[in-house]
Amino acid sequence: MSRFENLDPFDQPGPLALLRWKLGARRPDRGTPFATPTQGVDPARLERASLTWLGHSSFLVRLGGLLVATDPIFADRVGLARRNVAPPIAESALPAVDVVTVSHAHFDHLDLPSLQAIDARTRALTGQPPLYLVPTAVGRYLRAAGLAPVVERGWWEEHRVGDVRFTFVPQQHWSMRTPFDRNTALWGGWVMQAPEGTAYHAGDTGWFSHFAEIGARCGPIDWALLPIGAYDPRWMMQAQHMSAEEAGRAFVHCGAKHLVAMHWGTFQLTDEPLSEPPERVRRWWNEEGPGASEGHRLWVMDVGETRAL
């Protein structure tokens, strides 16, 4: 079975490095309780062009008349990590979803029970399933779970649904669901170009040298949905997860109008406190980025919050 590689190669930490991290000393404030800000989802607001954060990397995006769910996960836990904040809307209350995008096969981004719940809800409302847009070789996981139709795309490949053009773009990460399928499925992000504007969902990524290329080929980008958490310890995470400051640099390099923070506050996956990523991205924005006078372009949203696009 063929294996995929990053455009900017790096040595991925192996099982011994993972064990060293898991058994090593943790930051003393890691377990400090933190209540991620939340609000209830107003389904009526989802009918208009909008962006709703459901936690982690999960959004409901209304563009071009389509409702798109990105990396949806409603699970109570990922491995040993319990959910810090409940989903802001029940699966049974979801509106019909037109398209589901998946960035890669890790369990916190490809949660099959969540996709099956969206599938069942959408079929009940419309009689039709959503369309699943996934990276190359990820479709096998969905098909085995009875999910279809599935469209697979490689880096820079496109698929159009109505007025929305979806482009799968490279990111700096990796893929695995079992000990035997490491990097046998591709990873990346999705750019959604619609009449109202362009949204870029980066999935999981470390810093790499191609953010400017994404902006040049798929821009202008109006909303860059970038991961700001799961970055400590850096010796373990730097190659696969950006720090909050690196997310700021990625925002600048891709030439986006708004930075939308994601991948924080929902699961305690790494060693930094849950409250730290938004503090750091706000500090970067004010001290090194566009500055406080442009604060309206930095979206650090509550879980469940909807903003108009």
Image: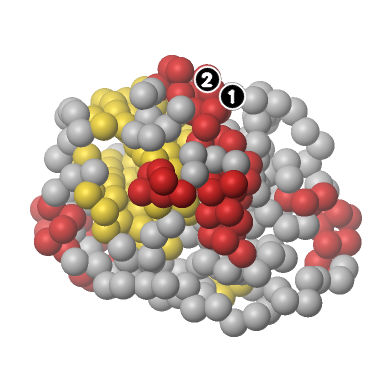
**Residue at 26 percent of width and 32 percent of height:** 197
Closer to the camera in the image, 288 or 25 = 288
Q: Which mark is residue 69?
A: none
Q: Where is residue 18 in the image (x, y as percent from the top left)?
A: 81, 57
Is residue 134 in sight in this rendering? no
Q: How many marks?
A: 2
Three-letter amino acid code of the residue under disc 2: Glu
What residue is rendered at 29% in x and 50% in y?
Answer: 51
Residue type, numbered disc 1: His
Residue 29 in sight here: yes
Position above or below: 192 against 308:
above
Q: In this view, does 209 lie to the left or right of 257?
A: right
Neighbor class of circle 1 (other Cα within 10 Å; few <14, some 14-19, many 20+) is some
Mark 2–mark 1 CB contact (< 8 Å)? yes
Percent position of residue 193, x then y: 29, 29
Kind of element beneath mark 1: loop
Residue 45 point in image, percent of width and height: 16, 58
Residue annotated with mark 1: 210
Q: Which residue lies furthest to the front in this view?
A: 293
Identify the element where label 2 is drawn: helix
Question: Where is mark 2, residue-wise?
Answer: 213
Q: In terms of image quadrants, where is residue 123?
A: bottom left
